């Protein structure tokens, strides 16, 4: 999906990191199963497959972006390294429930987070393991090196794909600096940004919903960026896992689990 912004229409376009799968730009292949929290989401829509990344945050729950297309036909794979050559570690699930943040706005990408409940509990092992929600809510300091991973584009050209999970390191920039570069797009307190000023490294289409990890802690969800990925003048944006969003995540999981227990009592 692309969101066309009139003031940038002549020269630049914002895109949501979503539809075309497979890889990070300027990254490297991960050691297989070294990021056991990674989730691969694929949703058939007509003749196409829409793909996103996600983060396993509980044995039954995946965190992804609200703009990612999720429905009852979505397939989620855990323990995946290569989606062309699956190994014995891959676990496949359907979707039980999906809950976009109630204040998500497609027009602005504010609160771009979504919870997806798996159709069953994941078997936790060396290749499948949740990543904890953050306990730190202060802004990520500028120049902090953060990491992301995904199966999104490796180049801006159509069809520039690879089937293996890649990772990339990116420096955070301040929200104020990000806002200046994206003016007149509103960068809210529910967002954070990274920028490789030299160009050449970035998340891209297909990486949406994947994690942004800073100093070992999950701090964001891949959300948006420039149409030409790794463009040195325009940052990539992430849903920022601040205290309000994390509290919403915990509350939603708690409510669903409580309802399940009550049903099982009957």
Image: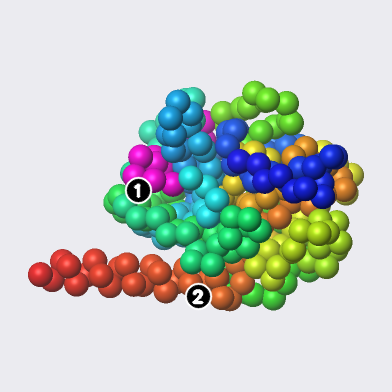
Q: Residue 171 carries which label?
A: none
Q: Which residue is drawn at 55% across and 62% down?
A: 104
- Looking at the image, which is closer to me, 208 or 34? 208
Let me know if residue 80 is in the magenta part: yes
Q: Residue at x 73, y 37 (%)?
A: 25
Q: Which residue is drawn at 82% across and 46% down?
A: 8
Please identify the dominant SS of the magenta region: loop
Q: Is any part of residue 134 visible from this angle?
A: yes
Q: Where is residue 111 in the image (x, y as percent from the top left)?
A: 59, 64
Which residue in the structure is indicated by mark 2? 247
Q: Which residue is drawn at 59% across and 33% down?
A: 20
Does residue 20 sit above or below 216 in this rendering? above
Does residue 231 sit above or below 136 in this rendering? above
Q: Which mark is residue 95?
A: 1
- Give the alpha-carbon distance from disc 1 to disc 2, as whole Å: 22 Å
The 10 Å Cα crowd at callout 1, few under 14, some 14 to 19, many 20 or more, is many
């Amino acid at each position: 999906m692309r969101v066309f912004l009139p003031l940038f229409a002549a020269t630049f376009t914002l895109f949501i990191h979503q539809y075309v799968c497979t890889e990070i730009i300027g990254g490297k292949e991960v050691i297989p199963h070294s990021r056991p929290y990674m989730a691969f989401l694929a949703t058939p829509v007509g003749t196409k497959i829409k793909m996103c990344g996600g983060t396993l945050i509980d044995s039954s729950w995946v965190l992804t972006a609200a703009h990612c297309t999720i429905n009852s036909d979505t397939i989620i794979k855990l323990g995946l390294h290569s989606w062309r050559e699956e190994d014995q570690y891959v676990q496949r699930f359907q979707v039980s429930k999906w809950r976009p943040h109630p204040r998500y706005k497609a027009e602005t990408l504010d609160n771009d987070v979504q919870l997806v409940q798996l159709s069953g509990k994941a078997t936790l092992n060396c290749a499948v393991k949740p990543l904890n929600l953050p306990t730190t809510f202060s802004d990520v300091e500028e120049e902090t090196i953060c990491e992301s991973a995904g199966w999104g584009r490796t180049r801006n050209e159509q069809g520039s794909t690879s089937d293996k999970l890649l990772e990339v390191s990116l420096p955070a920039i301040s929200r104020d600096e990000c806002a200046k570069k994206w003016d007149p797009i509103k960068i809210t307190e529910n967002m954070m940004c990274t920028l490789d000023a030299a160009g050449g490294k970035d998340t891209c289409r297909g990486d949406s919903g994947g994690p942004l990890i800073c100093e070992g802690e999950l701090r964001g969800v891949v959300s948006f960026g420039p149409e030409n990925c790794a463009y040195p003048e325009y940052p990539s944006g992430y849903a920022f896992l601040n205290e309000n969003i994390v509290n919403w995540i915990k509350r939603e999981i708690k409510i669903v689990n409580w309802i399940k227990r009550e049903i099982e009592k009957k």
